[in-house]
Amino acid sequence: MSNAPSSTSPRRTALDALHRSLGATMTDFAGWDMPLRYGSERDEHNAVRTKAGLFDLSHMGEITVTGPQAAALLDYALVGNIGGVGVGRARYTMICQEDGGILDDLIVYRLADAASPEYLVVANAGNAQIVLDALTERAAGFDARVRDDRDAYALIAVQGPESPGILKSLTDADLDGLKYYAGLPGTVAGVPALIARTGYTGEDGFELFTQPQHAEKLWQAITEAGAPAGLTPCGLSCRDTLRLEAGMPLYGHELTTSLTPFDAGLGRVVKFEKDGDFVGRAALAAAKERAESRPPRKLVGLIAEGRRVPRAGMSVVADGRVIGEVTSGAPSPTLGKPIAMAYVDAAHAAPGTAGVGVDIRGAHEPYEVVALPFYKRQK
């Protein structure tokens, strides 16, 4: 996700005044003014790993697709089998160009049944307009409607091992019965919301879609209910280190229009077995064959042997030559060492490969190649 250039001032979420009252450090992210951190990034990160964290994600782009052929449109427009998603379930998927390049990675929620189909497509903030435009264009010829609902939702996430207990005190919804990648309508602290068991941290947690006018009430209620459990407000900075440890890709870093899902090691999201054509099918079939027979580069994890932190764009080196590029890097609070994700030549991609380094300002710092993710929670 890159910061979109804009001549206008950044957009503000419904929780903007609240973030400022909490002393948040704000930053322009994809055209939105968002909290980067409230205090210590490390403390916020560790709170999510051990207790719970509260995030404002209202910058994400919500697009509603309705109509008799809503599923058929999404099956054509996206690489996943959306028609096979049951009511109340969600699917991680991607929207690709005709050449197979990734326009964005998405979560699609099926909200209503076959009698009146309704799907909620959630795009990354920096790509929301691109995804909206692509879906609108691809809807030609389908009896389906694509609606920009970015202003209709605020999105609040509660992530971490204490999150189920905190939310249970505020809702009658059956959270125990709510599976990972499922969502159900309910009320939280008296506020109507879509309660989804999804997240971007590697922990158990929930994302709550509600109307912007209810956002502050919901945030305050969760803050009060979570205080005894050690709930902490969290900014985008720790969200990035959490997703990096969990090996989750970030658009603009691990995912770009110059890469297909197969290049990114996420070919599983492409469903060739679904009925009918879909945008990018031929190019993706070729990409699958290429990835299986002669993969150009593979996405791997790197753990530093020293203390210097790798950053996106730095070269990965071995035997005196460049063998790849870092896509994301940061100090890992959980591992206590710098870590990175990088695309490297297949010959150097096996976990434990020796002699791999990162060129940090001319010095080749040694790194260990590991399988992703770096961190997996104990179920």
Image (cartoon, rainbow, N blue to C red):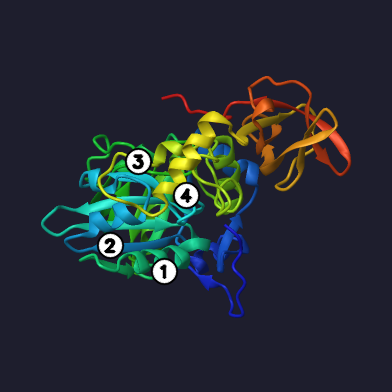
At x 13%, y 53%, the residue is 114
At x 23%, y 54%, the residue is 111
* Separation of marks 4 and 1 at Cα, in angstroms: 31 Å
Tell me if residue 203 comes above or below residue 8 in the rendering: above
User: Does dot 1 land on a helix, a strand or a loop?
Assistant: helix
User: Does dot 4 land on a helix, a strand or a loop?
Assistant: strand
**Amino acid type, callout 4:** Leu
* Separation of marks 4 and 2 at Cα, in angstroms: 28 Å
Q: For mark 3, what is the residue?
A: 271
Which is more foreground, mark 3 or mark 2? 3
Which is more foreground, mark 1 or mark 3? 3
**Amino acid type, callout 2:** Val
Q: Which mark is residue 65?
A: 2
**Amino acid type, callout 1:** Asp
- Point out the tag, 3 or 4, that comes first from the N-terminus: 4
Residue 114 visible in the snapshot: yes
- Point out the tag, 2 or 1, that comes first from the N-terminus: 2
Q: For mark 4, what is the residue?
A: 54
Tell me if residue 172 comes above or below residue 304 in the rendering: below
Q: Which quadrant of the figure has residue 181? A: top left
**x, y percent for residue 209:** 34, 57
**Amino acid type, callout 3:** Lys
Q: Is residue 297 left or right of residue 270?
A: right
- Point out the tag, 4 or 2, that comes first from the N-terminus: 4
Q: Nearer the viewer, residue 96 or 237?
A: 96
Circle 1: is it few (<14), some (14-19), or many (20+) Cα within 10 Å?
Answer: some
- Point out the tag, 1 or 3, that comes first from the N-terminus: 1
Tell me if residue 279 comes above or below residue 204 in the rendering: below
Q: Is residue 189 left or right of residue 51?
A: left
Q: Is residue 144 left or right of residue 30?
A: left
Q: For mark 1, what is the residue?
A: 133
